[in-house]
Image (cartoon, rainbow, N blue to C red):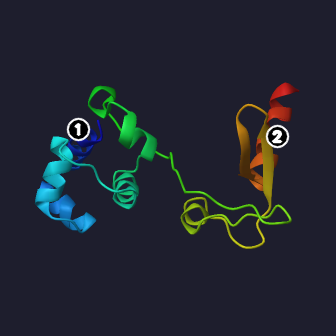
Amino acid sequence: MIGENIATLRRRAGWSQEALAERLEVSRQTLAKWEAGESVPDILRCDRLAELFDTSLEDLLHADLAQTGKAPRGKYIFGTVTVGDKGQIVIPVKARRVFDIKPGDDLMVLGDINQGLALVKADFFLEMSRQLQEMMK
């Protein structure tokens, strides 16, 4: 499926195999083998492909993008983080850039026993809460 998705997304972007291969720093032949299903890109190249096409790794690997008609936007896998002794984590640089998180920003930690944890900018969360209260009046 990944080979078909790479070819679909490349064509939609209007790029030749050569142009995409250059962006990925691989040969055109390597890209052609990926698209033909003869081999698969390594995880770093998959991450770069997802970034170039503004899709998630999950969708790049598993979605039938030829059928769905588009790659989902705004979905990311930023990688793993290690929880420190005091529960601290370091948010990956790419995530901080995408969500404009800067030192000193307040984040709200949300949790669902079945879904896991989520971080939301506190300002956004408070504004949404205020709007909900206004709607309920």
Q: Position of residue 25 (x, y in %)?
A: 24, 69
Whether residue 123 is visible: yes
Q: Position of residue 7 (x, y in %)?
A: 20, 43
**Residue 65 shown left or right of residue 56 in the figure:** left
**Amino acid bearing label 1:** Glu
Q: Nearer the viewer, residue 58 or 52?
A: 58
Residue 65 badge: none
**Residue 96 shown left or right of residue 137 in the figure:** left
- Which label's residue is closer to the chain start, 1 or 2? 1
Q: Position of residue 91 (x, y in %)?
A: 66, 64
Q: Is residue 11 above or below residue 31?
A: above
Secondary element under disc 2, as helix, strand or loop, is helix
Hey, which quadrant is residue 135 in on the image?
A: top right
Residue 4 badge: 1
Residues at marks 1 and 2, CA–CA distance in whole angstroms: 43 Å
Circle 2 sits on which residue?
129
Hey, which quadrant is residue 83 in on the image?
A: bottom right
Residue at screen point 33% across, 54% down: 49
Secondary element under disc 1, as helix, strand or loop, is helix
Hey, which quadrant is residue 98 in on the image?
A: bottom right
The answer to whether the residues at label 1 and label 2 have Cβ atoms under 8 Å apart is: no
**Amino acid bearing label 2:** Ser
Residue at screen point 72% across, 46% down: 118
**Residue 22 shown left or right of residue 95 in the figure:** left
- Few, some or many residues within 10 Å of mark 2 (<14, 14–19, 20+): few
Quadrant where the C terminus lies? top right
Whether residue 72 is visible: no
Residue at screen point 34% across, 57% down: 42
